[in-house]
Amino acid sequence: MRVYISVDIEGCAGVTAWDETEYGQPGYDYAAEQMTKEVAAACRGAMAAGADEIVVKDGHGSALNIIPSGLPRGVKLLRGWCQDIDSMMAGVGAGFDCAFYIGYHAEAGNSGNPLSHTTEFSVFQKATLNGEPMAEFDMNLLAASRHGVPSALITGDKAICEKALKTCPWIKTAAVKEGVSGGTLSMHPDDACDLIEEAARAAVSEKAYEQYEIPERFEMELTYKEHTKAKFASTYPGAVLTDSCTVRFETDDPAELLKAYSFMM
């Protein structure tokens, strides 16, 4: 049983301010430690249910946040960026039985997390895919699915868990906090880990996950905070500048969508 785990930080219990997500800033040490504890909990749950190989991808910022020694022995950790169109899902290729998403957060403009954003907070004001708000989860779900890997678990803020359930009704969730305007209402960090461990165990043991049905066509619209970045993004083949800050791109190829998004962000 092989499990792939993609990990972010803004959806982890207690993490509330941008400084906490950046190396060297106040609060970062707590956030990195909690990020590590939450993915370790997911690993323990999966292993208890029979997973014999787990690969973890650090998917936040520098991709050097997870404390390697904080993970259970036997777990493999992929650190740094691989310059791969699968980005936060690099290495997810065929052969994994399922994918987990730990520490995930609401998309740009969603009030469910004071740190809500899509990929780059300083870049995008709004992002949609086929007319719906686009979260990092949506692109990462697509990355896993194009390799034939079903998605089994997502943890993070309440908003992203609810969004994931609309797309993948079978997915197990563990909502560890919710946004309250500029603040968060969060579970105790250890309670969050217990919840995640149990959800991971259930996801692997029950094997209720399904393959996500990839849409036949994609229409992505990205609204930038700066018109100059939108202008540059529109130079990607097939991209169209619809107003001074918005770029639209259409394709029927999921790999091409991920490639275009990697360029545009």
Image (spheres, grey):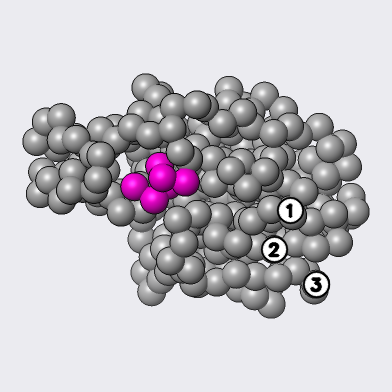
Determine if residue 198 is in view: no
Marks 1 and 2: in contact by CB < 8 Å?
yes
Query: Percent from the top left, x then y, of residue 161?
Result: 58, 33
Label 2: element kind:
strand
Q: Is residue 70 magenta?
A: no
Picture quarter containing residue 245? top left
Inter-mark Cα distance, 2 to 1: 9 Å
Location of residue 45 with respect to 221 vertically, above or below: below
Residue shown at 19% from the left, 35% from the top? 240
Q: Is residue 11 left or right of residue 200?
A: left
Query: Percent from the top left, x then y, of residue 130?
Result: 40, 25
Label 3: element kind:
loop
Location of residue 9 with respect to 155 vertically, above or below: below
Residue type at mark 2: give it. Answer: Val
Q: Residues within 10 Å of mark 3 (few under 14, many from 20)?
A: few
Location of residue 193 with respect to 246 vertically, above or below: below
Residue shown at 80% from the left, 63% from the top? 53
Residue shown at 41% from the left, 30% from the top? 218
Inter-mark Cα distance, 3 to 2: 9 Å
Circle 1 residue: 96
Q: Residues within 10 Å of mark 2 (few under 14, many from 20)?
A: many
From the viewer's side, name the closer residue of 17 and 23.
23
Inter-mark Cα distance, 3 to 1: 16 Å
Picture quarter containing residue 253? top left
Residue shown at 80% from the left, 73% from the top? 73
Residue lying farthest to the bottom in this orientation = 69
Circle 3 residue: 74
- Picture disc at residue 55: 2
Magenta stretch bounds: 255-260
